[in-house]
Image (cartoon, rainbow, N blue to C red):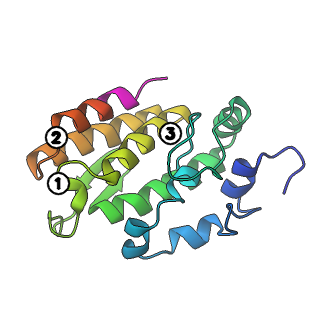
Amino acid sequence: MSESATPLIAFYRGEAGDHKGRTLEDIWALSPFWLEHTHDYVQWLFPIPEAGRFNGFAPLLSEADRAAFAADEALQANQRRSLDVMLAFFGLTRRALIIEALPELNMREHIWLKRGGHNHLRISRIIRSLHLCQQPELAAAFQQAMIEIGTTQGVVSEPSVDYWREANQP
């Protein structure tokens, strides 16, 4: 780990593991089943300054971390790859700033399309983290896609949509 790197930045650079020793690449390689039923990795992939309920071991996004993301395109690229992993999990795909549903998107296999649930909290976190980690255009594209797809192809509740709208704030 670089002397000046925080645990989060070292994780995102591939120099260290998370609180369980998993590397960024280890998490990228996990199955959709694992991504659904494990709750302590999203905080590492999409950090925010506030503590979450599910992982007291995850680092909080500091001003130093935000500055590192601003200065290092490789960190931003790795976070985009983390987003791509989550998009595939959600039944979506991305080309630059265009996020679309995959043909196989359905409510039975992609439970984020249903009312409530922990995936709606994950979506809020992802929007906020992308914005705070110097990728506001991508945060806005992800936010818009989730609102549009969630309300036209699913039954996402208005409170969830409101949280997603509010998540893209500084």
> How far apart are the alpha carbons under marks 3 and 1?
23 Å
Residue 59 in percent (x, y) is at 66, 46
> How far apart are the alpha carbons under marks 1 and 2?
8 Å
Q: Mark 1 falls on what kind of element?
A: loop
Mark closer to the observer (3, 1) = 1
Give the amino acid at mark 2: Ser
Q: Which residue lies under the disc numbered 2?
A: 157
Tag 3 and tag 2, C-beta contact below 8 Å: no
Q: Which residue lies under the disc numbered 3?
A: 129
Residue that sits furthest to the top in the current view: 170
Give the amino acid at mark 1: Lys
Magenta residues span 165-170
Give me the residue at 40% from left, 29% from top: 168
Give me the residue at 37% from left, 72% from top: 32
Q: Residue 26 sits in which quadrant?
A: bottom right
Magenta-drawn stretch contains 122: no
- Mark 2 neighbour density, 10 Å: few (under 14) some (14–19) many (20 or more): some
Q: Nearer the viewer, residue 67 or 50?
A: 50
Pick whichever of labels 1 and 2 is earlier in the sequence: 1
Q: Mark 3 falls on what kind of element?
A: helix
